[in-house]
Amino acid sequence: MVKKEPQAGRNEQLVRVLQLISDLARKGGCDLYELAERHGTTTRTIRRDLEAIAGAGIPLKREAGEGSRLRWSLDLDAARAREVADIVKRTAS
């Protein structure tokens, strides 16, 4: 039986998304152009990755940056609020 190697593209995408989450956790966040340059991809791909991250339930926030560029970061306040709500639900059950 021959094992198939996973597609490199899928692994690269997963690694990029995990790295994006790490980048977004930094103070001040990042704009789309910084992220695209850092990860060697387009801003369109970064937008899709950000949508996937938000769709997975990881809270993101956008804030005004230099000029008209928005800066993206993890919304840690929302994440902490969600954790507290989950703890309350578990203890009430």
Image (cartoon, rainbow, N blue to C red):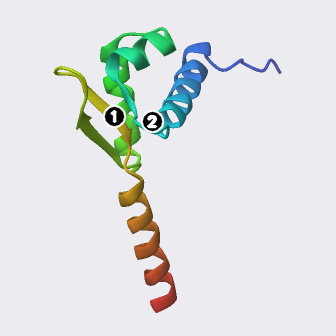
Q: Quarter-wise, where is residue 24 in the image? A: top left
Query: Left or right of 77: which side holds 38?
Result: right
Q: Residue furthest bottom?
A: 92
Tell me, yes or no, if residue 93 can be seen here: no
Residue 15 x %, y %: 59, 26
* Residue hosting label 2: 24
Q: Of the residues shown, which amino acid type is indicated by label 1?
A: Trp
Who is closer to the viewer here, 38 or 87? 38
Residue 57, disc:
none
Say which residue appears at 51% left-offset and 88% top-offset: 91
Whether residue 11 is visible here, answered yes or no, is yes
Depicted 43 relative to depicted 18: above or below = above
Q: Amino acid at mark 2?
A: Leu
Answer with the quarter of the image where residue 85 lies.
Answer: bottom left
Query: Is 18 situated above or below 16?
Result: below
Q: For mark 1, does the 10 Å Cα neighbourhood hold few (<14), some (14 to 19), or many (20 or more) residues? A: many
Residues marked 1 and 2 touching at CB (< 8 Å): yes
**Can you tell which mark lies on residue 72?**
1
Q: CA distance from mark 1 to mark 2?
A: 7 Å
For marks 1 and 2 on the same chain, the one whose residue lies earlier in the sequence: 2
Local secondary structure at mark 2: helix
